[in-house]
Image (cartoon, rainbow, N blue to C red):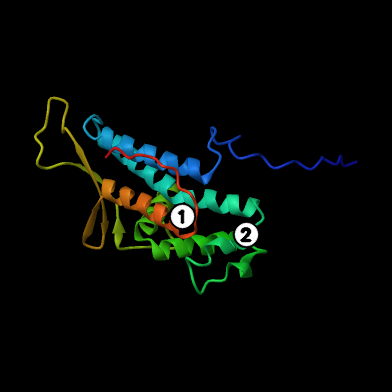
Amino acid sequence: MTIQQPPSSPTPHGEQSFGIRSWQDMFRKLCFELDEFVETRASDRNMAARGYRAINLAWTAWHVHDWFFEERMDAGDHHLAVVSPVFPGKDFSIAKKDRRKCQSMFGDELAERFEALSICRTLATAGKHGKSESRPRPELRAPEVRPIPWMADGPNGPICWDVRVLVGTQPWDARDLFLQAIADWRQFFALIGEAVPCVPINT
């Protein structure tokens, strides 16, 4: 005899994410992580720590879009009509019965319009899966963290570490990349009339 389990109610946002409940909270987390990344530039004493901070920033910068998407879907806006003016020519209603397809379309359109977010998507995917295969960007590299060449070594090694991302031959300083990702999010949310948390960035 099979015992019927009662249907489970959805878990509220924040119950499994240490109190982070909204895309606004994720945006605040992104700003916090960037401040921490800059503030610890002279105190991190190994390359791994700088790399860990950089990949955490990429994850947060990209996954703001997951939180925004989930909130819109949970609110019943199944085709994300609110973002249509930002992405003319894309009809999100065609994917309203396929949540995964709709989310993928939303991410693709964000990455197409905002270069820093596109870079963060690749870094976040590679950081999770080892490499980004579904949407490869072979010209994008973030292979290493290096001592800043113009600073002399101290008794405990190099004073600061340099974190860069290469897109073809163009280097992005990691700080500048993540500042631009924050600016991209501010622009996106301004375009759709969403209030963005006023978070000062001390960089």
Task: Tell me if residue 102 comes above or below residue 53 in the rendering.
Answer: below
Nearer-N-terminus badge (2/1): 2
| In front of the other: 142 or 150 | 150
Q: Residues within 10 Å of mark 1 (few under 14, many from 20)?
A: some
| In front of the other: 130 or 33 | 33
- What's the amino acid at mark 2? Arg
Secondary structure beneath dot 1 equals helix
Question: From this viewpoint, is residue 134 visible?
Answer: no
- What's the amino acid at mark 1? Phe
Q: Quadrant of the N terminus?
A: top right
Q: Quadrant of the C terminus?
A: top left
Secondary structure beneath dot 2 equals helix
Determine which of the numbered discs, if any, sits on residue 48 in the image: none
Q: Which residue is mark 2?
A: 99
Task: Tell me if residue 49 comes above or below residue 140 in the rendering.
Answer: above
The residue at 31%/59% (across/down) is 140
- Coordinates of residue 19 in the picture (x, y in percent): 55, 33
The residue at 35%/61% (across/down) is 115
Determine which of the numbered discs, if any, sits on residue 189 in the image: 1
